[in-house]
Amino acid sequence: MYTAVLSVLLLVFPASTKELLTNGGFEDSSHWHCTHIHCTLSPDSVAGQHSLRVSQRHHDTEGPAQDLTTVKRGGRYTASVYVKLMNDEAHVLGQSVMFNIQFVFKDKTSDMYLPMAHMPLVRSSDGWVHLVGDFVVPEKDIQLSRVKIFGPHPSVDYLVDSATVTQLPPLDPHWKDGTYRVIQAVRKSNIHLSITLENGLDPQKVTIKIDQMKHGFPFGTAVNSNLYLHGTEPRYNDFINKHFNWAVLENNLKWKANAPRANTSFYDGPVDTIKELRSHGIKVRGHCLVWSSETFLPTWVRTLRGDDLRRAVIHRIDEAMKRTHGLVEHWDVNNENLHGQWFQEVLQDRDYNLELFRIAHQADSGVKLFLNDNKVVARGANVQAYLAQATEFKNAHVGLYGIGAQTHFRDMTAPDPYLIKNHLDTLAKTGLPIWITELDLYHPDEKTRADWYETALRSMFGHPAVEGIMIWGFWSKKQWRGEPASLVSGDNFRINSAGQRFLHLLEHDWMTHAERNVTDTGAQFSVHGFHGDYDVTVLYNGHEVHQARQTFTLGKNDTHINIHVPKLGANIIG
């Protein structure tokens, strides 16, 4: 579906270059630190003669490590390693395997630990598992960098092989050219107009105006349900109603909010909020039916086991989907399943995450169902794991429609167009639509923040697999990361530099407004326009001809518009 456009973009970005690890093939045990653990060579390998067997660990955080001396401040790197579990932990569905990097800073501030690549629920029967990811070095002076391969329970031995950490060359300064070509090819279509005039009208006095009134592409925001519903800050509502065509409620459709205690049900508020949003032409995503992290579940649910838990889950999904039937377009089914598998572990059912989708699809087959996870676009540690999960769900035919990528960028970390594109390319291999579901980033300087938001938005809007972009709030007073992530600042509701840039992209650069003068009856011309809703107005001698006004929606296919300018008289406005 996206192959032709992706092939154009692939020419823009360079391949990786310098290798940082020494003896990543583990042909001997040199250069790897095995402090307090036992490391031996094994003939079972991915490539070469040997791999490294890791055993006799006391903590899941222990594993073979290597110091790197050449990582560069602000540098961009890819990471890869193969891991094979030699046994399994009893009564546990699988192990989390990590390839991490630790930074020790010269200014003596706290060490930073970044996951480079991660794979959850790994078992010995999986054989060799390939962990692939990437990372960006913080913009600080580094005293020491150390990579480590760890994660499984101490009772589980594992092999490691073919480890690499590879530097990427600087970003191509012309990266926007590739996104521009995609935007022109994928986000726009042709409007073909044919104009005829009533006898006696002078073509030289006829002007045709084509104005886009609304985006076809989904641009949305997270909404504070209570604030929006009660209208206590009209400027907040007005900003949403004016600038967005999609929304998602921040917390009010989560299980913890809808049923904080057993046998309770609180849906009226969020349902009324959704209805109000829809009355302004705003479509809504449902977030989220369940969450596989114990922290985000109602306390009473955490005590359930076996069939009691299964029944509670079915009731939750049925009730939530019935109360929102016909009101939401999407549902995130099982939030952040890469990072938590509480239901699967408690029920000892590795495939219960698939069952959750089956239950939701049966409850309302008309709603599009999504996976939703983090560190899959803004960061790279979980991209390969997400690809594997989405592929499994697609092949299981459980009703999965699309991939939700949350996209919370790390504090003080600029979005990287190459890495964003690489992550999206990887997820696009599934052939499923991708939605950016929770975009935000963090920098206290609003002009820098404006540049960063533009980079992120261009990279995403300029990728053919992305079907919608949602930001996770815009007002500093109601954005979970505060002012440094905001588009609108403070009690005076000032649209800051980041907000101005955001709106300029959405409502200027990516909207179509055209005006053409007619030279002859029977004239024809075309406009290459962004997808969305349009008004066509006809001016004769500077005055609008009311009867000739038209509206239409431009989608992925070209549209043909026939305009007939009638005799003048009562049809003239103004």
Image (tube, grey):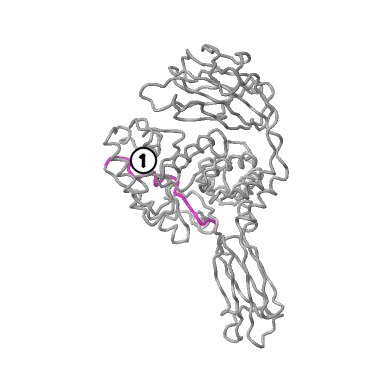
In the visual, does 318 lie left or right of 498?
left
Q: Quadrant of residue 315?
A: top left
The residue where tag 1 is placed is: 355
Residue at (62% x, 50% y) in the render:
4
Residue 566 x %, y %: 60, 84
Residue 147 x %, y %: 59, 22
In the image, residue 486 above or below residue 19 = below
Residue 208 x %, y %: 65, 73
Residue 544 x %, y %: 61, 78
In the image, residue 63 above or below residue 129 = above
Who is closer to the viewer here, 82 or 353?
82
Tell me the kind of residue under disc 1.
Glu
Please state, as top left, top right, bottom left or bottom right, where the C terminus lies in the image: bottom right
The total of numbered circles placed on residues is 1
Q: Quadrant of residue 344?
A: top left
Who is closer to the viewer here, 490 or 30?
30
In the image, residue 97 above or below residue 531 = above
The residue range painted magenta reads 243-262
**SS state under label 1:** helix
In the visual, does 285 lie left or right of 165?
left
In the visual, does 204 lie left or right of 303?
right
Residue 520: say if magenta: no
Q: Dot 1: few (<14), some (14–19), or many (≥20) neighbours within 10 Å? A: few
